[in-house]
């Protein structure tokens, strides 16, 4: 196909995998560790550098039209998440990192088998693959950590304020092991998954493109505001509103005075709040209950708390696509984030200690994660909830939505000996169409193992 598109043959190939997040949802952009693994599905690009500035992109999938532009004038249209824009994000990230205004052109044919808009990071895989293609064309070197950081940042050109999980695992993954990904500084540690269990991905078949709606960015903004509000509005700033009996006062009587002087307006992430207070995640949950109220906040109340105008809220804190949001559920979002961050650490600990009932314990954490995503973070949907129930009914010890949510896939932990019956029953229960026919199993429901990270294949 490359030959028929460009009349030449590729000089090298690059692959970057998608991922499944086992636990730790919507907490990477709050600064907390997550626990994903790479899947074997990936984006693969065949590349031929050319001597002009022409950048020509083609896709093996006819749904994605060819695209060409000049490599020294990259424009990324935030209004439409078109496929080639993800390629341009990766390219622009590398271009900017090296401060290059001109780039040589290339012919690229993109292929991929990660189901799109399904929570398995097909878009980040394309950004990472394009970043590595560009680096290889330039003949330069960067570490995997640097590449991951550059690609996480440059994917935001598309308009979504994602954390760094997807790009990090795409570069740092290693076959046979899941990874605990920690941020600031970015690092990845092996997490050995239980040998007696299999992780199964099931697609709800509800497509969700996080760049096409504002759901994702609204959550990022809610977390950002939750990090700023409690200590300005609650006990620290104005004196205790619970007559001295709130957890904030009981736990940290002395800390209150100390932290009063901190510049909360500079705080962006919930993890920074915890680090500044120097208390545990469990204590942060108690503090959240006192410092935030469960009723949604409106922009006026937020402005009052922060002492800023609506205009300042919009221009200094909110993203372009969240300017008109009228309701911010800060209490619920913060509770999800702190509890989910604690579940990630518990999950890793259980994997390390490997108790006899480890599959059951890990499953319980995954179930709790789903409940929190559904009720506190409100990033599930009826189909995902139904699929999770079906998976549990047919033998999963735990099941949860994975990725951004609002559609896409679930991940379940299934005892190895139950796998064949689990697959058969879930397939029948969720994928049987009203006419009795079944959706193709291969792409919708499959067991997966930790795969390897991004690679360049050069001709010998
Ligand atoms: C998307 C983002 C990630 C992460 C997940 C939710 O995949 O790109 O950074 O926030 O959603 O956990």
Image: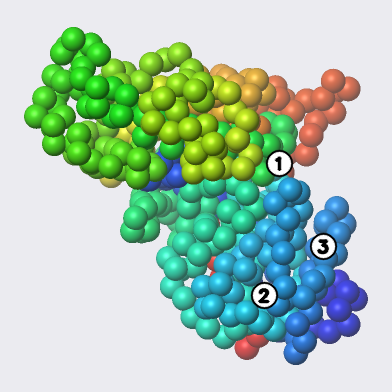
> Distance of mark 1 from mark 2, alpha carbons?
30 Å
Q: Position of residue 44 (x, y in %)?
A: 68, 65
Q: Position of residue 165 (x, y in %)?
A: 48, 50
Q: Quadrant of the N terminus?
A: bottom right
Q: Are marks 1 and 2 in contact (CB under 8 Å)?
A: no
Secondary structure type for disc 3: loop
Q: Nearer the viewer, residue 109 or 184?
A: 184
Tell me what residue is drawn at x 83 percent, y 66 percent: 67
Q: Which residue carries the number 1 mark?
A: 212
Which of the two discs, 1 and 2, labels the residue nearer the N terminus?
2
Say if disc 3 is inside 8 Å of ligand 1.
Answer: no
Image color mode: rainbow
| Within-10-Å neighbours for mark 1: few <14, some 14–19, many 20+ | some
Which of the two discs, 2 and 3, labels the residue nearer the N terminus?
2
Q: Quadrant of residue 113?
A: bottom right
> Distance of mark 2 from mark 3, alpha carbons?
14 Å
Which of the two discs, 1 and 3, labels the residue nearer the N terminus?
3
Q: Are marks 2 and 3 in contact (CB under 8 Å)?
A: no
Residue 455 lies, with reference to residue 393, above or below; the image says: below
| Within-10-Å neighbours for mark 2: few <14, some 14–19, many 20+ | many
Q: Is residue 227 visible?
A: yes
Tell me what residue is drawn at x 63 percent, y 69 percent: 91
Task: Please indicate whether residue 374 sits to the left or right of residue 260 in the image.
Answer: right
Q: Which residue carries the number 2 mark?
A: 13
Q: Nearer the viewer, residue 5 or 174?
A: 5
Point out which mark residue 60 bears: 3
């Amino acid at each position: 196909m490359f030959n028929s598109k460009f009349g030449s043959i590729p000089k090298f190939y690059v692959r970057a995998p998608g991922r499944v997040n086992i636990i730790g949802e919507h907490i990477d952009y709050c600064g907390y560790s997550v626990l994903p693994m790479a899947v074997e599905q990936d984006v693969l690009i065949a590349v031929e550098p050319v001597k002009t500035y022409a950048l020509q992109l083609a896709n093996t999938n006819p749904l994605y039209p060819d695209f060409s532009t000049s490599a020294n004038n990259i424009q990324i249209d935030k209004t439409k998440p078109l496929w080639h824009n993800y390629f341009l994000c990766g390219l622009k990230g590398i271009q900017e990192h090296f401060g290059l205004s001109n780039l040589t052109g290339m012919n690229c044919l993109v292929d991929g088998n990660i189901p799109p808009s399904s929570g398995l990071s097909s878009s980040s895989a394309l950004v990472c693959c394009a970043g590595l293609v560009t680096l290889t064309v330039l003949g330069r070197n960067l570490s995997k950590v640097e590449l991951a950081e550059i690609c996480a940042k440059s994917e935001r050109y598309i308009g979504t304020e994602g954390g760094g999980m997807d790009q990090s695992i795409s570069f740092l993954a290693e076959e046979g092991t899941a990874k605990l990904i920690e941020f600031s500084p970015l690092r990845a540690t092996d997490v050995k998954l239980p040998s007696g269990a299999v992780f199964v991905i099931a697609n709800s078949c509800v497509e969700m493109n996080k760049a096409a709606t504002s759901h994702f960015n609204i959550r990022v903004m809610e977390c950002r505001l939750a990090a700023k509000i409690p200590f300005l509005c609650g006990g620290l700033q104005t004196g205790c509103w619970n007559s001295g009996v709130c957890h904030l006062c009981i736990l940290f009587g002395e800390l209150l005075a100390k932290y009063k002087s901190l510049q909360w307006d500079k705080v962006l992430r919930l993890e920074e709040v915890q680090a500044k207070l120097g208390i545990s995640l469990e204590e942060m949950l108690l503090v959240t209950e006192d410092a935030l109220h469960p009723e949604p906040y409106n922009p006026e109340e937020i402005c009052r708390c922060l002492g800023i105008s609506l205009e300042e809220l919009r221009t200094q804190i909110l993203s372009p696509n969240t300017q008109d949001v009228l309701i911010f559920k800060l209490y619920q979002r913060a509770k999800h984030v702190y509890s989910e961050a604690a579940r990630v650490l518990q999950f890793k600990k259980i994997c390390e200690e490997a108790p006899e009932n480890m599959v059951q314990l890990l499953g319980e954490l995954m179930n709790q994660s789903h409940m929190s995503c559904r009720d506190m973070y409100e990033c599930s949907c009826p189909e995902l909830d139904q699929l999770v129930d079906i998976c549990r009914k047919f033998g999963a010890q735990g099941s949860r939505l994975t990725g951004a949510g609002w559609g896409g896939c679930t991940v379940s932990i299934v005892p190895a000996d139950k796998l064949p019956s689990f697959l058969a029953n879930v397939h029948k229960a969720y994928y049987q169409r009203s006419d009795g026919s079944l959706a193709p199993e291969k792409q919708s429901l499959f067991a997966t193992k930790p795969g390897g990270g991004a690679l360049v294949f050069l001709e010998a």
